[in-house]
Amino acid sequence: MEELAKACASTALILMIQELGSLPIKLFGSDELKQRYLPRLASGEWSPAFALSEVEAGSDPGGMRTRAVRDGDDWILNGEKNWITNLGIADLFVVFAVTDPEQGHSHGISAFAVEADWPGVSVGKLEHKMGIRGSPTGQPVFTDVRVPGANLIGEAGEGFKVAMATLDRSRLGVAAQGLGLAQGATDFAAAYAKERRQFGKPIIGFQGIQFKLADMETQCAAARELLYKACAKVDRLEPDMGKYSAMAKLFCSDTAMNVTTEAVQVLGGYGYVKEYPVERMMRDAKITQIYEGTNEIQRLVIARTL
Ligand SMILES: Cc1cc2nc3c(=O)[nH]c(=O)nc-3n(C[C@H](O)[C@H](O)[C@H](O)COP(=O)(O)OP(=O)(O)OC[C@H]3O[C@@H](n4cnc5c(N)ncnc54)[C@H](O)[C@@H]3O)c2cc1C
C-alpha cells in the first residue's frame, strides 16, 4: 500500500478496502462464510465495502440507526449508510446494524455480509470529493433486505467488536497510504528542485529548500519506523497493538499532510497546478487524517492507554 500510494493514493485504496471489507469475515466469520466469500475477495474477482458510518454516526458509530430484525432464520435489514468507499462497484457489503436497541452499542449491534445484487440493496448519492477522486464514495440504501441467518458475521450483538478489531488492523493501511503519499511527494520535490533553476542555479542549492527537503525526508523515515513497528505488533497480536496502530495512523497521516503541503511549496506555482502530481497528493493526503477514525479519535484511543 505504501509503494502504491507513492504514485497514486486512489490505487492504494483499492487494496485497502479489499482488506477492510475482508477482515470482518476473516476474523469473525463462520467457516461457511469464509469459504463462500474469501477466495473471491482474495483473487480480486469481488470487491467489498465496509458499511459502518451513517449521516448521524461518524466518530460515534454507536449512534447508528440502521436496523436488522429477526424474521425466522433470516434478518430484515433497513437503513442508509454514509461515506461508503466502493459504492457502485462493491459486490459485497459488510453492514453493521442495530439488532438489540436495549443493549447499547457494545452488545446491541451486529455485522452482516450482504451481497450487492440482493433485492432491496441500492446505490444512493455519490459524493464529489476533494481528493481520492479515483475511488467512489457514497450512500448505500438497504430497504427490507432479507439476509440469511448464515450471513451474520460472528455472534448477534458482536458487531461493535467486529468493527473495532477490524479497524485496529486496517488503520495500518491508512498509515501506509499516508506514508506513501509523503514519500512520493518528497521524492518528486527533490527531483524537481535539482532541475528547476532560479537566480542562476538549481533551487536545491538554496539552503531554505534544502532544509525543507531534509525535514520532509526525516518525517517520512520516522513515520516508517513507527508504522513498521505497529505492523509487527499486529502480526504478533501484542496487547498494545491497538495503541500502536492508532499512533501509526495519527503520525503517518499528519506527516502526509505536512509533507505534501511542503512539496507544493517547493514546486512554487507549478506545485499548485495539475501539470505536476503534488497538488493531487496534497488533496489526497487530507483524507488520511479523517477516515477510519479521525486523528482526534486516534488521540482519544492513545490517551486512554496512558
Ligand atoms: C472519502 C471517505 C471515505 C470513507 N469511507 C468509509 C467507508 O468505507 N466505510 C465507513 O464506514 N466509513 C467511511 N468513511 C467515514 C469516515 O470514517 C468518517 O467520515 C469519520 O469517521 C468521521 O466521521 P464524520 O465525518 O461523521 O465526522 P464527525 O464525527 O462529525 O466529526 C467532526 C469533527 O469532530 C471531531 N470529533 C468528533 N468526536 C470527537 C471527540 N469525541 N473528541 C474530539 N473530537 C471529536 C472529529 O475528529 C472531527 O474533526 C469515509 C469518509 C470519507 C470522507
Image: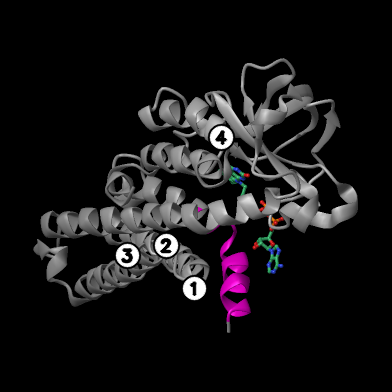
Judging depth in this view, the residue of 110 and 167 nearest the camera is: 110
Q: Main secondary structure of the magenta part?
A: helix
Circles 3, 4 touching at the beta carbon (< 8 Å): no
Circle 2 Cα neighbour tier, 10 Å, few/some/many (<14 / 14–19 / ≥20):
some
Above or below, comparing residue 268 to residue 217 in the picture: above
Disc 4 and disc 1: Cα gap in Å?
27 Å
Can residue 85 be seen by looking at this rendering? Answer: no
Nearer the N terminus, badge 2 or badge 1? 2
For residue 234, the mark is: 2
Q: Is residue 20 left or right of residue 220?
A: right
Q: Write down the quadrant of residue 51 in the picture.
A: top right
Nearer the N terminus, badge 4 or badge 2? 4
Disc 3 and disc 4: Cα gap in Å?
26 Å
| Region in magenta | 288-305
- Amino acid type indicated by mark 4: Ala
Furthest toward the left, the residue is 200
The mark lying in front, picked from 3 and 1, is 1
Circles 2, 1 touching at the beta carbon (< 8 Å): no
Picture coordinates of residue 220, whole percent (x, y): 30, 66
Q: Which residue corresponds to the image point at 72% horizontal and 52% vertical from the top-left?
A: 61
Judging depth in this view, the residue of 165 and 28 nearest the camera is: 28
Furthest toward the right, the residue is 102
Q: Considering the image in quadrants, where does the C terminus appear?
A: bottom right
For residue 240, the mark is: 1
Q: Which residue corresponds to the image point at 23% horizontal and 57% vertical from the top-left?
A: 189
- Mark 3 lies on a secondary structure that is helix
Which residue is denoted by mark 4 in the rendering? 49
